[in-house]
Amino acid sequence: MNRLIEIRNVSAGYGHKVVLKDINLDVFRDDFLGIIGPNGGGKTTLLKLILDLISPMGGTVRFYTGGEEVPKLRIGYLPQMNQIDKKFPISVKEVVASGLSFEKPRFRSFTKEQEQRIEEVLVQMGLEDLSGRPIGQLSGGQLQRVLLGRSIVSCPQVLILDEPNSYVDKRFESRFYQLLEEINKESAIILVSHDIGTVLTMVKNIACVNETLHYHAGSNISEEWLGETYACPIELVGHGHLPHRVLKKHEH
């Protein structure tokens, strides 16, 4: 009843190149799913399937609300930092508000309710004093908050985070993860990252994508499972409350 996304026997790729083969995945309403895997393993292709940017070569991707199949979901998306043009002349508030642009008739102003929602998100992200500042004048952490605000202002059913650690402002890192815990009370979250240690401290379930998809309920995974799904040895190194995973020496 609380399933949002259902992927069944999906293969996908580009042209004649198959990147994902016969994958299956469910994402539920209160899920916090971590997607890990080696570079080139298909993580980005999986995101494109969920965002409906590409169609599967085979299999089905279905969306549900309240147990009923729907054409699409409200999905918020936080892209990687290297996809952002900081020279574009736009303010913090305008970026956050752009997350509601699809709900606003063209050439019309936002409603009072929408303006209130924008202000609420600015406060939630700690950006109320920066609302008029151009994004080119922001630090990495500030820009991360702006883009996170844009991705949640529409109250999405699913929030997708693509390599959030690409934002280098470490001063905001702990607050960022606190915000994700708050957001997860209202939205399912899919977090894609190569930083396995960070993923394991945050998520409820894990999917490793390496051409195929291996799902693990819970985040208490073993070195053996990681090694099998990555197709090379992975070693666990404990470090305080932030466990790390690093590669052992292995042949590429």
Image (cartoon, helix red, strand yellow):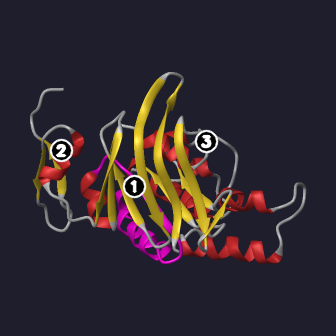
Three-letter amino acid code of the residue under disc 3: Leu
Tell me which residue sits at (88%, 55%) in the image.
Answer: 106
Instruction: Mark 3 vs mark 2: give the one in front.
Output: 2
State the residue position of label 3: 53
* Disc ID at residue 169: 1
Tell me which residue sits at (57%, 59%) in the image.
Answer: 146
The residue lying toward the viewer, choosing from 234 and 228, is 228
Q: Where does residue 45 sit, x and y in percent of width and height?
A: 48, 39
Looking at the rendering, which quadrant does residue 150 occupy? Answer: bottom right
Q: Is residue 217 above or below residue 61?
A: below
- Residue range highlighted in magenta: 170-195
Q: Residues within 10 Å of mark 1 (few under 14, many from 20)?
A: some
Q: Where does residue 239 sit, x and y in percent of width and height?
A: 13, 61
**What distance separates the C-alpha of mark 1 from that of mark 3?**
30 Å
Query: Which comes sooner in the sequence, label 2 or label 1?
Result: 1
**What distance separates the C-alpha of mark 2 from that of mark 1?**
33 Å
Q: Is residue 181 magenta?
A: yes
Query: Which comes sooner in the sequence, label 1 or label 3?
Result: 3
